[in-house]
Amino acid sequence: MGGTSKTTQTQTSQLSPYEPAAGTLNGILGNLSTIAGGVGTTPNTAQTSAINQLSANGTAGSPFTSALTSGALGLLNGGGATANDAAITNNLNDYKGLLTSTANGSEIGANSALKPQLDQITHDVTDQVNGAWAAAGRDGSPGNAQALGRGIAAGVAPVIAAQYNTDKTNQLNAASSLYNAGNTTYGILNGNNATANGNITAGTNVASAALNNENWGANTTLAAEAQRSGIPLDQYKTLLGMVSPVAATFGTQNGTATGTSEMSGLQQMAMLGQGLGSWSSLLFGA
């Protein structure tokens, strides 16, 4: 007769912490439970004082927020770089007003001092020529008139030519000055605009800093409160990491095991045979 046998066993075990470590471990777990409830505080007085100071600073807010905001607004409006543009333009216009008539040639031959000078030359030449011709008894003659005309022309021509050349030189110089003044003025204005644009770019960065500074108080308070709970939590976690291995390593393992066994048909027949033999011996004797 064939068959198989099967045995089933169930074991339950429990680890009791190492007795010297059990109190510390229970205390740490109790404090962690307290922190989990939201009422944990740092055990270190210096740390608590520092955190309270950070929290107070956060509540008060940053003292630089107003200045940064004002500075950002000023920069975003150009930083005053173009504030004097009107005055600079007026300077150019005033300069043009002084030189335009010279530069356009309307002053050529219009020197008010020229006529008295020419009149004086004419008077002197007339007196000299007429006196000479009168001394010769020929005053009023055609020769006298011709000589007088040539004398006056010879006297005033160089003066008129010199004045003309001076006026033309002044005209060219005035035109050049106006051109250079215009370039200089527009260069200044363009530079002011470039500075204003740079200030606007800088203002964007300052505006970002101002916004961050405005949130500085809240962020500082949050960081302080995170430290208030985080510092003791980290300490307890460190202690727990130190104590737990010791408690587990030297702990006591307790356990129980229960099991069931199922016999094969062959085993059952053998046991039945043994039982019958024992019964027969008792009944009939050995």
Image (cartoon, rainbow, N blue to C red):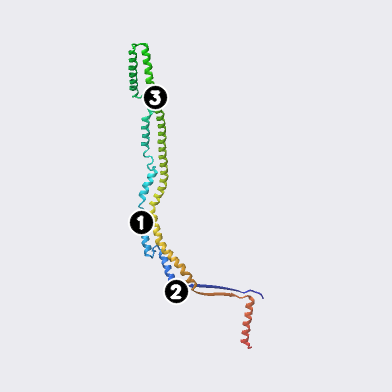
Q: Amino acid at mark 2?
A: Pro
Is the residue marked by circle 3 packed among few (<14), some (14-19), or many (20+) residues within 10 Å? few
Residue matched to label 3: 162
Mark in the foreground, 2 or 3: 3
Q: Which residue occupies the foreground of this view, 125 or 54?
A: 125
Quarter of the figure that contains the N terminus: bottom right
Residue matched to label 1: 57
Q: Are marks 1 and 3 in contact (CB under 8 Å)?
A: no
Q: How many discs appear?
A: 3
Q: Check the image and report above or below for 61 versus 186.
A: below
Q: Kindly identify the residue that appears in the image at 58 percent across and 75 percent down.
A: 261
Q: Which residue occupies the foreground of this view, 164 or 43?
A: 164
Mark in the foreground, 1 or 3: 3
Q: Residue furthest right?
A: 1
Q: Are marks 2 and 1 in contact (CB under 8 Å)?
A: no
Q: Amino acid at mark 1?
A: Asn
Residue matched to label 2: 20
Q: Which residue occupies the foreground of this view, 154 or 168?
A: 154
Q: Earlier in the sequence, mark 1 or mark 3?
A: 1
Please, what secondary structure does the residue beneath circle 1 have?
helix
Q: Quadrant of residue 73?
A: top left
Q: Quadrant of residue 114?
A: top left
Q: Check the image and report above or below for 250 versus 42.
A: below
231 horizontally vs 123: left or right: right
Q: Amino acid at mark 3?
A: Ala
Q: Kindly identify the residue that appears in the image at 64 percent across and 79 percent down.
A: 270
Report how far apart the C-alphas of labels 2 and 3 lie in the structure: 121 Å
Q: Earlier in the sequence, mark 2 or mark 1?
A: 2
Mark in the foreground, 2 or 1: 1
